[in-house]
Amino acid sequence: MLHLLCKDPESPNNGSPTLYYDDVSDTYLLQGWRIVDPERLASIRIPEHEIVVEFPKRLLRLFPSEAGESHIRATP
């Protein structure tokens, strides 16, 4: 099941970036801004089955740590 953990509090439309936690696969999903700048994309090797997204540094403070911290869930 997916759990909404946080949304960028400074997002102009409150839509993204957004971080989710999947308790079935024990993984995180990050919704962010699609990178379309060819110069930036050319500097990274991206396999066909992957995509690169961008998010602001301010969102990092909302990420859970591996030190056993509970997930901080966003309020709807």
Image (cartoon, rainbow, N blue to C red):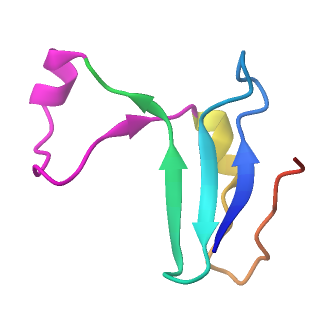
Q: How many marks?
A: 0
Residue 9 spot, x, y in % from top left: 79, 31
In the rendered view, tell whether residue 21 sits above or below residue 53: below
Query: Residue 45 in magenta?
Result: yes
In the rendered view, tell whether residue 52 sits above or below residue 28: above
The quadrant the N terminus occupies is bottom right
Q: Residue at x 13, y 31 (%)?
A: 43
Q: Residue at x 26, y 20 (%)?
A: 36
Q: Residue at x 39, y 37 (%)?
A: 53
Which of 23/39 is in front?
Answer: 23
Residue 64 spot, x, y in % from top left: 68, 66
Our reading of the magenta stretch's main secondary structure is loop
Q: Is residue 49 left or right of residue 36?
A: left
Q: Residue at x 81, y 60 (%)?
A: 73
Residue 65 spot, x, y in % from top left: 65, 70
Which of 75/65 is in front?
Answer: 75
Q: Quadrant of residue 63?
A: bottom right
Q: Which residues are magenta?
A: 37-56
Q: Is residue 1 left or right of residue 14?
A: left
Residue lying at the far front in this picture: please name it.
1
Query: Residue 36 in magenta?
Result: no
In the rendered view, tell whether residue 37 sits above or below residue 73: above
In the rendered view, tell whether residue 16 sits above or below residue 12: below
Which of 3/35 is in front?
Answer: 3
Q: Is residue 70 left or right of residue 18?
A: right
Which of 44/4 is in front?
Answer: 4
Residue 13 spot, x, y in % from top left: 72, 19
